[in-house]
Amino acid sequence: MRQILSQQQLDEGVTRLAQFIDCSKSAPPLTIIGVLNGSIVLVADLIRRLEGPLRIAMVWASSYRGDAITAGNLELRMDVLPDLKDQDVLVVDDIFDTGHTLQTIIKEISTYNPIRIRTLVLLKKHGKSQVSIAPDFIGFEIPDEFVVGYGLDFNGLWRHLPYLAALDPEDRVEDKVAIVPAVRRSKNDLSISEPEE
């Protein structure tokens, strides 16, 4: 695993993105729609840097399943969105790869009749876009590598990393994941138990 962006660089990038978004002049209040699961860290850090009224909602989208490193069919769940009619919407996603996810989300959200839809992504892969749209706000352009950390995962792992790292092929081998002994609480003490074979 190789670090691509440090925690400090990510922090500065999110601050820069927040400066582009002026919630105080948004009428009606800005509605931020985060794309789960990858944008959870970004959305949390971004909204703490914004001033003025805003609403937060989430949609779930995934085109990567399990240990896949290339996008497959997009699955989208938007059933928990608030009323977006005549609202100012900002869709926040972790990464713009081919662009199909963001394009599909914009198309679906437009059926709710908001007054405006803008998009913000933390990362854009250089030279990967397969669609005619582009994000309105981009934190960083990165090379075409599979990345983890700061909310992005591989097979459910590595979202917690405070930095962004490129996942090398040898990092994707599941049997290299260390097995950590489980902690089991007995009546009056803590005991360590080895995993069962």
Image (spheres, grey):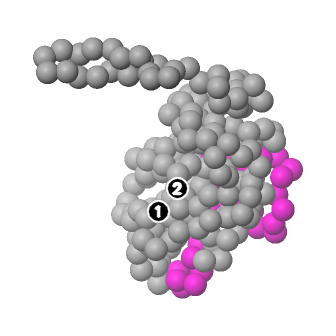
- Do labels 1 and 2 touch, CB within 8 Å? yes
Question: Where is mark 2, residue-wise?
Answer: 36
Kind of residue at disc 2? Leu
| Residue 103: image location, x then y, percent | 70, 69
| Mark 1 → mark 2, Cα distance in angstroms | 7 Å
Residue at the disc numbered 1: 58
Which range is magenta? 109-137
N-term-proximal mark, 1 vs 2: 2
Which quadrant: the N terminus? top right
Q: Can residue 21 be seen from the camera position used here?
A: no
For mark 2, give the secondary structure. strand
Q: Position of residue 157 (x, y in %)?
A: 56, 36
**Crowd band around label 1 with a 10 angstrom C-alpha radius: few (<14), some (14–19), many (20+):** many
Q: Which quadrant of the figure has residue 69?
A: top right
x, y (%) of residue 83?
42, 80
Residue 48 visible here: yes
Q: Residue at x 46, y 74 (%)?
A: 79
Q: Position of residue 136 (x, y in %)?
A: 67, 61
Toward which corner of the image does residue 35 lie, by quadrant? Answer: bottom right
Determine if the magenta segment contains residue 120: yes
Is residue 122 shown left or right of residue 60? right
Query: How many other residues sit within 10 Å of disc 2, few (<14), some (14-19) or many (≥20)?
Result: many
